[in-house]
Amino acid sequence: MKLASFDIELATPLPEGSRDLDALEISCAAVAFGDRENIEVFEGDPALSRSQSQELLDLLGTIASEGYGIATWNGCAFDFPVLAHSAGQLPRSARLALSHHDLMLYVTFQKGWYLGLQKALAGAGLAGKLKEIRLSGGTLVTNMDGSKAPQLWADGEREAVIAYLEQDVRQQLSLATWIAEHEKICWTSSSGNPWNLQIPKLYTVEECFDFLQPDVSWMDNPPEREQFVEWMPQPLQPG
């Protein structure tokens, strides 16, 4: 299978705990390809316009039709709905989201908890997210994460934000390739215990809804499957 990866960064901060994505703007987005060196980057000024967001959707639709499996980490509940609202094309975005490979859902839908990309990358022996970036004035940011991207973008530190984005999209792609080859996801829990989950193939989001529901009776406020697709038009929502 040919693989690609898609990721965005925000131009507007997401309030902690909020799932209200329709007002968020995209500062930049990237698509990486398993069979190409170059990464397609979309830059907003300061945010992607509607036409730019539609162009990004066009690209994703085209590569999907060419046989690429598109991989994300939590893209079903974040990247795709933000892009859907930015482009003003919810049905089209929903269909792409349902047919893509959200690697996080493999764990969340079968174990009942969230898993961070950093832990999955470490479990695969892959380089992690970019934690250190140097700003244009020479300042070294040593604890970079996505929550800092909107302010850095507003401050004109676009090269730094794009470098962070490109590392994320590359490593998502590397992880998808690793999972496809090894047929599992591995990670170490916060208590230091090793875990692995067998993944016989790369499942689409729609196929993930066929996984047996895990026992989450012991958990406080576990994630519900419906929350990942609540942004989609009702006729398209699986489950």
Image (cartoon, rainbow, N blue to C red):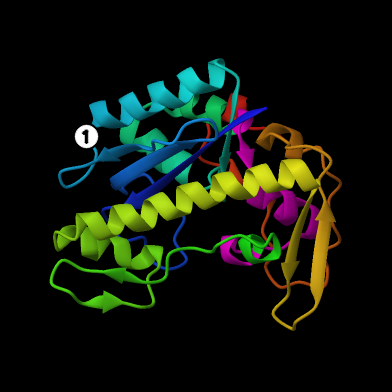
Confirm whether residue 119 shows in the render: yes
What's the magenta bit mostly, secondary-structure-wise?
A: helix
Looking at the picture, tell me which residue is in the foreground, 33 or 19: 33
Q: Position of residue 76 (x, y in %)?
A: 56, 42
Part of the protein shown in magenta: 98-119
| Foreground of the two, 17 or 28 | 28
Mark 1 belongs to which amino acid? Ser
Residue, far front: 37
Residue appearing at x 39%, y 77% in the figure: 143
Please, is residue 229 above or below residue 141 in the view?
above
Q: Nearer the viewer, residue 75 or 225?
A: 75
Q: x and y percent of residue 34 in the render? A: 55, 35
At 39% from the left and 47% from the top, the residue drawn is 8
Horizontal relation, residue 237 to residue 36: left or right: right
Image quarter for residue 191?
Answer: bottom right
Q: Which residue is mark 1?
A: 49
Residue 212 lies left or right of residue 62; in this view the side is: right
Tag 1 secondary structure: loop
Residue 155 in the image: state x and y as whole percent. 14, 63
Residue 150 figure quarter: bottom left
Which residue reaches farthest bottom? Answer: 191
Q: Residue at x 47, y 47 (%)?
A: 169
- Screen quadrant of the N terminus: top right
